[in-house]
Image (cartoon, coloured by chain):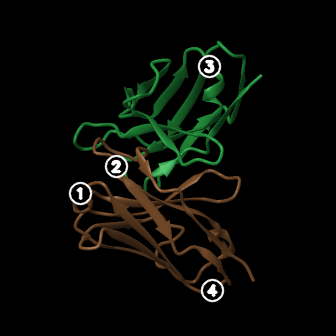
Chain colours: A brown, B green
Amino acid sequence: QVQLVESGGGVVQPGRSLRLSCTASGFSFSSHGMHWVRQSPGKGLEWVAVISNDGTGKYYADSVKGRFTISRDNSKNTMDLQMTSLRAEDTALYYCAKEFDYGGLGVYWGQGTPVTVSS
Amino acid sequence: DIVMTQTPLSSPVTLGQPASISCRSSQSLVHSNGNTYLTWLQQRPGQPPRLLIYKISNRFSGVPDRFSGSGAGTDFTLKISRVEAEDVGVYYCMQATHFPWTFGQGTKVEIK
């Protein structure tokens, strides 16, 4: 069955960097766009970034553009999110999600990896 | 960016009674391919979101038929015909027509 497992979260000081990873299994990873979505404590969902199936297409939320970089390695079934210049407002649970074939998200998500930006 | 506005933000409902959530987008969600990528998601406490409805009105596999979606263009609605205890949670609309994709603020459905 489809599994998405995030890793790499933790506590980091403002201005520092952190790299999140998502390891996928149970489906043809190289055939699907993949997304990062985050949720700040007690808050709503915020879409962060997407990478196309072949890695050539990338889009970002305005709030992270220029600071976060999404990438993938189809040979390893992994997707990464390199986060730099972290701010307190980046504190959130970060989910990776597989794009739904009929548009959008929601069928397959990981359990999330928590990121806390604090001095 | 497209702003998704949900109303109400909180919906206390009596078991067995209907509930309705509205979602309005700041721009049309009709894609150049003719599809409208408006989805509804449910999030129960401590869990990732779950897909309920895609492309305005298509119920995802396994979603009870008491959930229905409707709308067009910029105005969309999720209806629960008879709320059950397991429906408690936060409901989000999300547009996947234009990048960046955006979510509504969420509507908390709770039992009165």
Question: What's the residue type where badge 3 is placed?
Answer: Val
Write down the residue under mark 3: B83
Determine the residue positioned at 53% across, 34% down: B23
Tell me which numbered mark, 1 or 4, is placed earlier along the sequence: 4
Could you tell me the amino acid type at mark 1? Ser
Estimate the x, y position of residue A32 in percent, counting from the top left: 27, 56
- Spatial separation of the CA atoms under disc 1 and disc 2: 11 Å
**Is the residue marked by circle 1 packed among few (<14), some (14-19), or many (20+) residues within 10 Å?**
few
**Circle 3 chain:** B
Q: Quadrant of residue A74?
A: bottom left
Q: Amino acid at mark 4?
A: Gly
- The label nearer to you, 3 versus 2, is 2
User: Mark 2: which amino acid?
Assistant: Gln
Q: Label 2 vs label 4: CA separation?
A: 38 Å
Find disc 1 in the rendering and name its residue: A28
Towards the viewer: A117 or B70: A117
Q: Is B102 on the left or on the right of A10, as rendered?
A: left
Residue that label 4 marks: A15
Q: CA distance from mark 3 to mark 1?
A: 37 Å
CA gap, disc 3 to disc 2? 30 Å
Q: Nearer the viewer, residue A22 or B52?
A: A22
* Mark 3 residue element: loop
Q: What crowding class fits label 4: few (fewer than 14 Cα within 10 Å), some (14-19), or many (20 or more)?
A: some
Q: Which residue is mark 2?
A: A1
| Marks 4 and 3 in Cβ contact (< 8 Å) | no
Q: Are marks 3 and 1 on the same chain?
A: no
Q: Position of residue A53 (x, y in %)?
A: 25, 62
